[in-house]
Image (tube, rainbow, N blue to C red):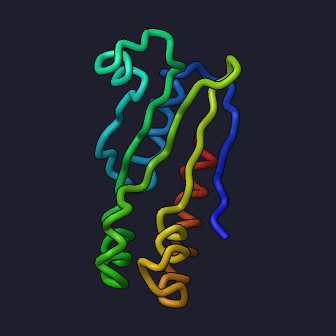
Amino acid sequence: MVEILRKEVPYGFDETVRRVEEAMLSEGFGVQLTTGIHDMLKKRLGIDDYPKYTMVLGCKPQLAKRALETSLDMGTIFPCSFTIYEEDGKVKVAHVSVMKIGAEIGLADKKAMAPLIEDTGKTVQKVWDKI
């Protein structure tokens, strides 16, 4: 089963984005992209009042390599992402495991992915605890 990690944080939006990036970097993830979806909607669709929503996309090369060695199809759902968003006046962070999703939807063998899912879960939990 794939569960979503989700929590409300006591920080402002921009500080939360910074904390997510720093937590990822501290655990060996490279931050590939941080993008404000709300900014894109404003620019491309003219929506001025969309709640803040930012994605932080990252990759931990050692884990990505192991996933690709299990199945090259796993790359179709890379990279790992954390989302930061405003909802009901509160700032929230969410994450879902691409490794678990890949195994669940048949991109890779569940049994072969099990050790990687366990290792990735431990690493992501360390990031999660720092946010």
Q: Residue at x 45, y 31 (%)?
A: 54
Q: Residue 80, position in %: x, y? A: 42, 55
Q: Quadrant of the C terminus?
A: top right
Q: Quadrant of residue 22?
A: top left
In terms of depth relative to the viewer, which is nearer, 9 or 44?
44
Q: Quadrant of residue 68?
A: bottom left
Q: Residue at x 56, y 50 (%)?
A: 95
In terms of depth relative to the viewer, which is nearer, 31 or 98?
98
Q: Is 54 situated left or right of 5 in this image?
A: left
Q: Residue at x 54, y 70 (%)?
A: 100
Q: Is 54 situated left or right of 3 in this image?
A: left
Q: Residue 38, position in %: x, y? A: 43, 23
In terms of depth relative to the viewer, which is nearer, 108 or 127?
108
Q: Residue at x 43, y 82 (%)?
A: 108
Q: Residue 13, position in %: x, y? A: 54, 22
Q: Quadrant of the N terminus?
A: bottom right
Q: Residue 124, position in %: x, y? A: 54, 58
Q: Among all residues in the image, which is located at the extreme front?
A: 45
Q: Is residue 54 above or below residue 122?
A: above
Q: Is residue 4 above or below residue 52?
A: below
Q: Is 80 situated left or right of 40 in this image?
A: right
